[in-house]
Amino acid sequence: MTTTVSSPPPTSNLPAGLTEPDAERLRSLRKMKLLAVSLLIGAGVIYLFTRWLEHRDGADVAAWVGYVRAASEAGMVGALADWFAVTALFKRPLGLPIPHTALIPRKKDEIGEQLGGFIEDNFMTPEVIEERAVSVDLPRRISTWLADPGNADRVNAEASRAIGLVAEMIRDEDVETFIQAVMKWAAEPLWAPPAGRILEQLVDEDRLAPVMQLLCDQAHDWSLGSQGLIDRVIDDDAPTWAPRFVNNLVGDKIYRELTEFTYKVRADPEHPLRIAIMEFVQQFSDDLQHDDMMIAKFEEIKKELLGRDEVTGAASTAWQAAKGVIEQMLADPNSILRSSLADAVTRLAVQIRDDQPLQDKMNRWIARAARHFAVNYSAEIISVITETVRSWDAEETSRKIELQVGRDLQFIRINGTVVGSLAGLVIYTVSVLLFH
Protein backbone atom coordinates (compact mmCIF):
# COMPACT_ATOMS: atom_id res chain seq x y z
CA MET A 1 0.00 0.00 0.00
CA THR A 2 1.32 3.40 -0.94
CA THR A 3 1.22 6.06 1.73
CA THR A 4 0.78 9.60 0.53
CA VAL A 5 2.51 12.17 2.66
CA SER A 6 1.07 15.64 2.31
CA SER A 7 3.64 18.31 1.81
CA PRO A 8 3.76 21.07 4.42
CA PRO A 9 2.19 24.36 3.47
CA PRO A 10 4.61 26.80 1.87
CA THR A 11 6.20 29.10 4.39
CA SER A 12 5.83 32.79 3.96
CA ASN A 13 8.87 34.79 2.97
CA LEU A 14 7.49 37.91 4.61
CA PRO A 15 9.54 39.55 7.33
CA ALA A 16 8.17 38.97 10.82
CA GLY A 17 5.19 41.15 11.68
CA LEU A 18 4.69 42.50 8.16
CA THR A 19 1.72 42.06 5.92
CA GLU A 20 2.11 41.57 2.18
CA PRO A 21 1.39 45.26 1.39
CA ASP A 22 3.94 46.36 4.01
CA ALA A 23 6.48 43.91 2.65
CA GLU A 24 6.00 45.34 -0.83
CA ARG A 25 6.49 48.86 0.53
CA LEU A 26 9.65 47.71 2.31
CA ARG A 27 11.07 46.28 -0.91
CA SER A 28 10.28 49.49 -2.77
CA LEU A 29 11.83 51.58 0.01
CA ARG A 30 15.03 49.56 -0.08
CA LYS A 31 15.29 49.99 -3.84
CA MET A 32 14.96 53.76 -3.55
CA LYS A 33 17.49 53.86 -0.72
CA LEU A 34 19.91 51.84 -2.84
CA LEU A 35 19.44 54.27 -5.72
CA ALA A 36 20.05 57.30 -3.47
CA VAL A 37 23.18 55.71 -1.95
CA SER A 38 24.41 54.74 -5.40
CA LEU A 39 24.18 58.36 -6.57
CA LEU A 40 26.10 59.50 -3.46
CA ILE A 41 28.79 56.89 -4.03
CA GLY A 42 28.93 57.79 -7.70
CA ALA A 43 29.39 61.48 -6.86
CA GLY A 44 32.13 60.51 -4.39
CA VAL A 45 33.97 58.36 -6.92
CA ILE A 46 33.81 61.13 -9.52
CA TYR A 47 35.07 63.65 -6.99
CA LEU A 48 38.02 61.46 -6.01
CA PHE A 49 38.82 60.80 -9.66
CA THR A 50 38.89 64.50 -10.51
CA ARG A 51 41.04 65.24 -7.45
CA TRP A 52 43.45 62.55 -8.60
CA LEU A 53 43.59 64.11 -12.06
CA GLU A 54 44.33 67.54 -10.51
CA HIS A 55 47.03 66.03 -8.32
CA ARG A 56 48.58 64.19 -11.23
CA ASP A 57 48.52 66.93 -13.87
CA GLY A 58 48.89 69.98 -11.64
CA ALA A 59 48.64 73.19 -13.63
CA ASP A 60 48.29 71.24 -16.86
CA VAL A 61 45.05 69.58 -15.79
CA ALA A 62 42.20 69.75 -18.31
CA ALA A 63 39.75 72.61 -17.92
CA TRP A 64 36.73 70.34 -17.66
CA VAL A 65 38.09 68.63 -14.57
CA GLY A 66 37.34 71.62 -12.35
CA TYR A 67 33.76 71.77 -13.49
CA VAL A 68 33.18 68.06 -12.87
CA ARG A 69 34.94 68.22 -9.49
CA ALA A 70 32.78 71.16 -8.35
CA ALA A 71 29.59 69.45 -9.51
CA SER A 72 30.46 66.15 -7.82
CA GLU A 73 31.56 67.86 -4.63
CA ALA A 74 28.32 69.86 -4.38
CA GLY A 75 26.35 66.74 -5.24
CA MET A 76 27.93 64.90 -2.29
CA VAL A 77 27.16 67.79 0.03
CA GLY A 78 23.55 67.93 -1.14
CA ALA A 79 23.13 64.18 -0.85
CA LEU A 80 24.62 64.07 2.65
CA ALA A 81 22.58 67.03 3.82
CA ASP A 82 19.32 65.56 2.54
CA TRP A 83 20.23 62.11 3.90
CA PHE A 84 20.65 63.72 7.30
CA ALA A 85 17.33 65.56 6.98
CA VAL A 86 15.38 62.47 5.94
CA THR A 87 17.03 60.19 8.48
CA ALA A 88 16.51 62.69 11.29
CA LEU A 89 12.76 62.30 10.87
CA PHE A 90 12.79 58.64 11.87
CA LYS A 91 15.98 58.02 13.87
CA ARG A 92 19.26 59.50 15.04
CA PRO A 93 21.74 59.64 12.11
CA LEU A 94 24.57 57.17 12.80
CA GLY A 95 23.12 56.75 16.29
CA LEU A 96 24.59 60.07 17.41
CA PRO A 97 22.61 62.08 20.01
CA ILE A 98 22.30 65.10 17.73
CA PRO A 99 19.66 67.64 18.84
CA HIS A 100 16.40 67.79 16.88
CA THR A 101 16.76 64.32 15.36
CA ALA A 102 14.48 61.24 15.63
CA LEU A 103 11.60 63.69 15.45
CA ILE A 104 8.77 61.22 14.92
CA PRO A 105 9.64 58.88 17.84
CA ARG A 106 10.21 61.81 20.20
CA LYS A 107 7.27 63.91 19.07
CA LYS A 108 4.79 61.07 18.51
CA ASP A 109 2.25 62.28 21.07
CA GLU A 110 2.49 65.89 19.92
CA ILE A 111 2.05 64.78 16.31
CA GLY A 112 -1.12 62.87 17.28
CA GLU A 113 -2.52 65.90 19.10
CA GLN A 114 -1.67 68.23 16.25
CA LEU A 115 -3.19 65.82 13.73
CA GLY A 116 -6.35 65.59 15.83
CA GLY A 117 -6.49 69.37 16.19
CA PHE A 118 -6.00 69.83 12.45
CA ILE A 119 -8.84 67.43 11.66
CA GLU A 120 -11.10 69.00 14.27
CA ASP A 121 -10.46 72.55 13.03
CA ASN A 122 -10.73 71.79 9.34
CA PHE A 123 -12.96 68.73 8.92
CA MET A 124 -15.09 68.22 12.02
CA THR A 125 -16.67 71.65 12.27
CA PRO A 126 -20.49 71.62 12.26
CA GLU A 127 -20.63 73.77 9.13
CA VAL A 128 -18.33 71.48 7.13
CA ILE A 129 -20.05 68.29 8.29
CA GLU A 130 -23.52 69.69 7.60
CA GLU A 131 -22.57 70.97 4.15
CA ARG A 132 -20.95 67.69 3.23
CA ALA A 133 -23.91 65.66 4.47
CA VAL A 134 -26.27 67.65 2.25
CA SER A 135 -23.99 67.62 -0.80
CA VAL A 136 -23.66 63.84 -0.72
CA ASP A 137 -27.45 63.53 -1.25
CA LEU A 138 -27.64 60.10 0.35
CA PRO A 139 -31.42 59.58 0.00
CA ARG A 140 -31.33 59.98 -3.78
CA ARG A 141 -28.19 57.89 -4.26
CA ILE A 142 -29.24 55.03 -2.01
CA SER A 143 -32.84 54.90 -3.21
CA THR A 144 -31.75 54.99 -6.87
CA TRP A 145 -29.37 52.09 -6.31
CA LEU A 146 -31.92 50.06 -4.34
CA ALA A 147 -34.66 50.68 -6.90
CA ASP A 148 -32.52 49.42 -9.78
CA PRO A 149 -33.83 45.94 -10.79
CA GLY A 150 -30.29 44.90 -11.56
CA ASN A 151 -29.44 45.17 -7.88
CA ALA A 152 -32.43 43.14 -6.66
CA ASP A 153 -30.41 39.99 -6.00
CA ARG A 154 -27.80 41.98 -4.11
CA VAL A 155 -30.47 43.72 -2.03
CA ASN A 156 -32.09 40.36 -1.32
CA ALA A 157 -28.82 38.80 -0.20
CA GLU A 158 -27.64 41.75 1.89
CA ALA A 159 -30.98 42.23 3.65
CA SER A 160 -31.15 38.54 4.46
CA ARG A 161 -27.57 38.58 5.70
CA ALA A 162 -28.32 41.57 7.94
CA ILE A 163 -31.33 39.82 9.49
CA GLY A 164 -29.26 36.68 9.94
CA LEU A 165 -26.52 38.60 11.72
CA VAL A 166 -29.05 40.18 14.06
CA ALA A 167 -30.52 36.75 14.81
CA GLU A 168 -27.03 35.38 15.52
CA MET A 169 -26.16 38.25 17.86
CA ILE A 170 -29.35 37.83 19.89
CA ARG A 171 -28.96 35.03 22.41
CA ASP A 172 -31.92 32.82 23.20
CA GLU A 173 -31.41 33.46 26.91
CA ASP A 174 -31.65 37.21 26.38
CA VAL A 175 -34.85 36.87 24.37
CA GLU A 176 -36.40 34.61 27.00
CA THR A 177 -35.40 37.04 29.74
CA PHE A 178 -36.89 39.90 27.71
CA ILE A 179 -40.15 38.02 27.18
CA GLN A 180 -40.41 37.24 30.87
CA ALA A 181 -39.68 40.87 31.74
CA VAL A 182 -42.38 42.05 29.32
CA MET A 183 -44.88 39.60 30.76
CA LYS A 184 -44.01 40.71 34.29
CA TRP A 185 -44.36 44.36 33.26
CA ALA A 186 -47.68 43.66 31.57
CA ALA A 187 -48.99 41.84 34.65
CA GLU A 188 -48.32 44.72 37.04
CA PRO A 189 -51.23 47.09 36.16
CA LEU A 190 -54.88 46.12 36.61
CA TRP A 191 -56.33 44.49 33.52
CA ALA A 192 -59.99 44.47 34.54
CA PRO A 193 -60.87 48.20 34.25
CA PRO A 194 -59.21 48.69 30.82
CA ALA A 195 -60.78 45.46 29.56
CA GLY A 196 -64.16 46.64 30.85
CA ARG A 197 -63.81 50.00 29.14
CA ILE A 198 -62.87 48.35 25.84
CA LEU A 199 -65.78 45.93 26.10
CA GLU A 200 -68.17 48.76 26.96
CA GLN A 201 -67.01 50.77 23.96
CA LEU A 202 -67.50 47.77 21.68
CA VAL A 203 -71.06 47.38 22.96
CA ASP A 204 -71.86 51.08 22.60
CA GLU A 205 -70.54 51.15 19.05
CA ASP A 206 -72.37 47.91 18.17
CA ARG A 207 -69.07 46.28 17.25
CA LEU A 208 -70.08 42.92 18.79
CA ALA A 209 -73.00 42.36 16.39
CA PRO A 210 -70.85 40.42 13.84
CA VAL A 211 -69.46 38.28 16.65
CA MET A 212 -72.98 37.61 17.94
CA GLN A 213 -74.17 36.68 14.43
CA LEU A 214 -71.21 34.33 13.99
CA LEU A 215 -71.99 32.58 17.28
CA CYS A 216 -75.65 32.21 16.32
CA ASP A 217 -74.74 30.78 12.93
CA GLN A 218 -72.38 28.28 14.52
CA ALA A 219 -74.97 27.32 17.13
CA HIS A 220 -77.61 26.65 14.46
CA ASP A 221 -75.17 24.66 12.33
CA TRP A 222 -74.28 22.58 15.37
CA SER A 223 -77.96 21.99 16.19
CA LEU A 224 -78.60 20.68 12.66
CA GLY A 225 -76.05 17.96 13.24
CA SER A 226 -76.98 17.18 16.83
CA GLN A 227 -79.57 14.40 16.20
CA GLY A 228 -77.15 11.60 16.95
CA LEU A 229 -75.91 13.26 20.14
CA ILE A 230 -79.47 13.84 21.39
CA ASP A 231 -80.41 10.20 20.75
CA ARG A 232 -77.37 8.93 22.65
CA VAL A 233 -78.04 11.18 25.63
CA ILE A 234 -81.71 10.07 25.84
CA ASP A 235 -80.79 6.42 25.50
CA ASP A 236 -78.20 6.76 28.28
CA ASP A 237 -80.36 8.78 30.70
CA ALA A 238 -83.86 7.43 29.99
CA PRO A 239 -85.38 4.80 32.36
CA THR A 240 -84.62 1.24 31.36
CA TRP A 241 -88.32 0.42 31.27
CA ALA A 242 -89.10 3.20 28.72
CA PRO A 243 -90.05 1.83 25.28
CA ARG A 244 -87.68 2.50 22.40
CA PHE A 245 -90.26 4.40 20.33
CA VAL A 246 -90.90 6.79 23.27
CA ASN A 247 -87.21 7.67 23.38
CA ASN A 248 -87.24 8.30 19.65
CA LEU A 249 -90.26 10.57 19.93
CA VAL A 250 -88.66 12.57 22.73
CA GLY A 251 -85.40 12.80 20.79
CA ASP A 252 -87.14 14.03 17.65
CA LYS A 253 -89.12 16.57 19.70
CA ILE A 254 -85.96 17.92 21.33
CA TYR A 255 -84.15 18.05 17.98
CA ARG A 256 -87.00 20.00 16.30
CA GLU A 257 -87.30 22.42 19.16
CA LEU A 258 -83.54 22.98 19.28
CA THR A 259 -83.17 23.59 15.55
CA GLU A 260 -86.22 25.87 15.44
CA PHE A 261 -84.99 27.83 18.45
CA THR A 262 -81.45 28.30 17.10
CA TYR A 263 -82.88 29.26 13.72
CA LYS A 264 -85.07 31.96 15.31
CA VAL A 265 -82.11 33.30 17.29
CA ARG A 266 -79.99 33.26 14.14
CA ALA A 267 -82.59 34.98 11.96
CA ASP A 268 -83.88 37.62 14.41
CA PRO A 269 -81.37 40.31 15.47
CA GLU A 270 -83.90 41.43 18.12
CA HIS A 271 -84.44 37.99 19.61
CA PRO A 272 -84.81 38.08 23.42
CA LEU A 273 -81.84 35.72 23.85
CA ARG A 274 -79.63 38.04 21.87
CA ILE A 275 -80.83 41.02 23.89
CA ALA A 276 -80.23 39.12 27.13
CA ILE A 277 -76.70 38.19 26.07
CA MET A 278 -75.87 41.78 25.16
CA GLU A 279 -77.30 42.99 28.47
CA PHE A 280 -75.12 40.44 30.26
CA VAL A 281 -72.04 41.61 28.32
CA GLN A 282 -72.85 45.22 29.15
CA GLN A 283 -73.30 44.42 32.83
CA PHE A 284 -70.08 42.39 32.79
CA SER A 285 -68.15 45.33 31.28
CA ASP A 286 -69.54 47.58 34.03
CA ASP A 287 -68.57 45.08 36.75
CA LEU A 288 -65.03 44.87 35.39
CA GLN A 289 -64.70 48.60 35.92
CA HIS A 290 -66.55 49.17 39.19
CA ASP A 291 -67.18 45.90 41.05
CA ASP A 292 -64.27 45.26 43.43
CA MET A 293 -65.11 41.58 43.74
CA MET A 294 -65.19 41.09 39.96
CA ILE A 295 -61.92 43.03 39.55
CA ALA A 296 -60.26 40.85 42.20
CA LYS A 297 -61.45 37.64 40.51
CA PHE A 298 -60.25 38.88 37.13
CA GLU A 299 -56.82 39.73 38.56
CA GLU A 300 -56.55 36.30 40.18
CA ILE A 301 -57.23 34.67 36.83
CA LYS A 302 -54.61 36.93 35.18
CA LYS A 303 -51.94 36.13 37.76
CA GLU A 304 -52.64 32.43 37.61
CA LEU A 305 -52.50 32.46 33.83
CA LEU A 306 -49.30 34.48 33.49
CA GLY A 307 -47.64 32.73 36.40
CA ARG A 308 -47.92 29.26 34.91
CA ASP A 309 -44.73 27.69 33.64
CA GLU A 310 -46.56 26.62 30.50
CA VAL A 311 -47.12 30.27 29.52
CA THR A 312 -43.48 31.38 29.94
CA GLY A 313 -42.28 28.14 28.39
CA ALA A 314 -44.60 28.64 25.44
CA ALA A 315 -43.14 32.11 24.88
CA SER A 316 -39.59 30.73 24.84
CA THR A 317 -40.60 27.83 22.61
CA ALA A 318 -42.37 30.19 20.24
CA TRP A 319 -39.21 32.32 19.91
CA GLN A 320 -37.00 29.32 19.23
CA ALA A 321 -39.44 27.96 16.67
CA ALA A 322 -39.79 31.35 15.01
CA LYS A 323 -36.01 31.77 14.95
CA GLY A 324 -35.59 28.37 13.31
CA VAL A 325 -38.20 29.17 10.67
CA ILE A 326 -36.62 32.56 9.96
CA GLU A 327 -33.14 31.05 9.59
CA GLN A 328 -34.48 28.34 7.30
CA MET A 329 -36.33 30.82 5.12
CA LEU A 330 -33.33 33.16 4.96
CA ALA A 331 -31.14 30.29 3.79
CA ASP A 332 -33.50 29.62 0.87
CA PRO A 333 -32.96 32.19 -1.93
CA ASN A 334 -36.46 31.50 -3.24
CA SER A 335 -38.29 31.74 0.08
CA ILE A 336 -41.30 34.00 0.50
CA LEU A 337 -39.57 35.87 3.32
CA ARG A 338 -36.56 36.83 1.22
CA SER A 339 -38.60 37.78 -1.84
CA SER A 340 -41.08 39.77 0.26
CA LEU A 341 -38.26 41.53 2.06
CA ALA A 342 -36.55 42.46 -1.20
CA ASP A 343 -39.85 43.64 -2.71
CA ALA A 344 -40.58 45.81 0.32
CA VAL A 345 -37.14 47.41 0.17
CA THR A 346 -37.47 48.02 -3.56
CA ARG A 347 -40.95 49.59 -3.24
CA LEU A 348 -39.74 51.88 -0.47
CA ALA A 349 -36.70 52.86 -2.54
CA VAL A 350 -38.87 53.66 -5.59
CA GLN A 351 -41.14 55.81 -3.45
CA ILE A 352 -38.19 57.78 -2.07
CA ARG A 353 -36.52 58.06 -5.49
CA ASP A 354 -39.64 59.52 -7.12
CA ASP A 355 -40.55 61.86 -4.25
CA GLN A 356 -38.30 64.92 -4.35
CA PRO A 357 -39.97 66.66 -1.36
CA LEU A 358 -39.37 63.53 0.70
CA GLN A 359 -35.72 63.49 -0.38
CA ASP A 360 -35.37 67.13 0.64
CA LYS A 361 -36.92 66.38 4.01
CA MET A 362 -34.60 63.38 4.53
CA ASN A 363 -31.60 65.51 3.57
CA ARG A 364 -32.63 68.04 6.23
CA TRP A 365 -32.87 65.23 8.77
CA ILE A 366 -29.42 64.00 7.81
CA ALA A 367 -28.00 67.53 7.99
CA ARG A 368 -29.46 68.08 11.46
CA ALA A 369 -28.17 64.71 12.64
CA ALA A 370 -24.72 65.41 11.19
CA ARG A 371 -24.57 68.83 12.84
CA HIS A 372 -25.66 67.38 16.18
CA PHE A 373 -23.04 64.67 15.76
CA ALA A 374 -20.30 67.20 14.99
CA VAL A 375 -21.27 69.52 17.85
CA ASN A 376 -21.54 66.85 20.51
CA TYR A 377 -19.19 64.06 19.49
CA SER A 378 -16.34 65.55 17.44
CA ALA A 379 -14.14 65.75 20.53
CA GLU A 380 -14.67 62.03 21.21
CA ILE A 381 -13.75 61.17 17.62
CA ILE A 382 -10.62 63.28 17.77
CA SER A 383 -9.71 61.69 21.10
CA VAL A 384 -9.74 58.32 19.32
CA ILE A 385 -7.01 59.59 16.99
CA THR A 386 -4.87 61.16 19.72
CA GLU A 387 -5.25 58.27 22.15
CA THR A 388 -4.53 55.73 19.44
CA VAL A 389 -1.34 57.54 18.38
CA ARG A 390 -0.34 57.93 22.03
CA SER A 391 -0.72 54.19 22.60
CA TRP A 392 1.60 53.30 19.72
CA ASP A 393 5.17 52.29 20.37
CA ALA A 394 7.50 55.13 19.31
CA GLU A 395 9.93 52.98 17.33
CA GLU A 396 7.18 50.94 15.75
CA THR A 397 5.34 54.13 14.78
CA SER A 398 8.48 55.49 13.17
CA ARG A 399 8.91 52.29 11.17
CA LYS A 400 5.29 52.26 10.03
CA ILE A 401 5.40 55.88 8.88
CA GLU A 402 8.70 55.31 7.12
CA LEU A 403 7.17 52.37 5.26
CA GLN A 404 4.29 54.57 4.13
CA VAL A 405 6.20 57.68 3.01
CA GLY A 406 9.87 56.64 3.07
CA ARG A 407 10.00 55.77 -0.62
CA ASP A 408 8.84 59.25 -1.61
CA LEU A 409 11.25 60.83 0.86
CA GLN A 410 14.15 59.11 -0.89
CA PHE A 411 13.45 61.39 -3.84
CA ILE A 412 14.58 64.24 -1.59
CA ARG A 413 17.99 62.56 -1.32
CA ILE A 414 18.10 61.91 -5.04
CA ASN A 415 17.05 65.45 -5.84
CA GLY A 416 19.60 66.73 -3.33
CA THR A 417 22.36 64.94 -5.20
CA VAL A 418 21.20 66.12 -8.62
CA VAL A 419 20.29 69.68 -7.62
CA GLY A 420 23.46 69.98 -5.52
CA SER A 421 25.58 68.92 -8.48
CA LEU A 422 23.88 71.43 -10.76
CA ALA A 423 24.19 74.16 -8.14
CA GLY A 424 27.89 73.41 -7.65
CA LEU A 425 28.44 73.46 -11.39
CA VAL A 426 26.68 76.83 -11.73
CA ILE A 427 28.57 78.34 -8.80
CA TYR A 428 31.93 77.14 -10.13
CA THR A 429 31.10 78.37 -13.63
CA VAL A 430 30.13 81.81 -12.34
CA SER A 431 33.28 82.03 -10.24
CA VAL A 432 35.44 81.08 -13.25
CA LEU A 433 33.74 83.71 -15.40
CA LEU A 434 34.22 86.38 -12.73
CA PHE A 435 37.80 85.71 -11.66
CA HIS A 436 39.61 84.30 -14.73
Image: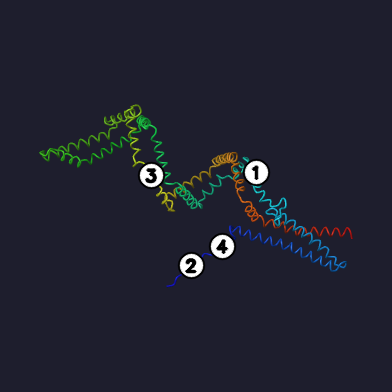
Quote the CA–CA distance across marks 2 and 3.
49 Å
User: Which part of the image, by quadrant, shows the N terminus?
Assistant: bottom left
- Which residue is labeled 3 in the image? 316
The residue drawn where x is 20% and y is 37% is 256
User: Which corner quadrant of the image does residue 213 belong to?
Assistant: top left
- Where residue 12 is drawn, which disc sits there? 4
Q: Nearer the viewer, mark 4 or mark 1?
A: 4
Q: Is residue 21 left or right of residue 249?
A: right
> Looking at the image, do the residues carrying marks 4 and 2 touch, with CB atoms under 8 Å apart?
no
Which mark sits nearer the N-terminus, 4 or 1? Answer: 4
Residue 15 drawn at (x, y percent): 60, 60
Which mark sits nearer the N-terminus, 1 or 2? Answer: 2
Q: Nearer the viewer, mark 4 or mark 3?
A: 4
Q: 202 and 149: which one is in front? A: 202
- Where residue 117 is drawn, which disc sits there? 1
Quote the CA–CA distance across marks 4 and 2.
18 Å
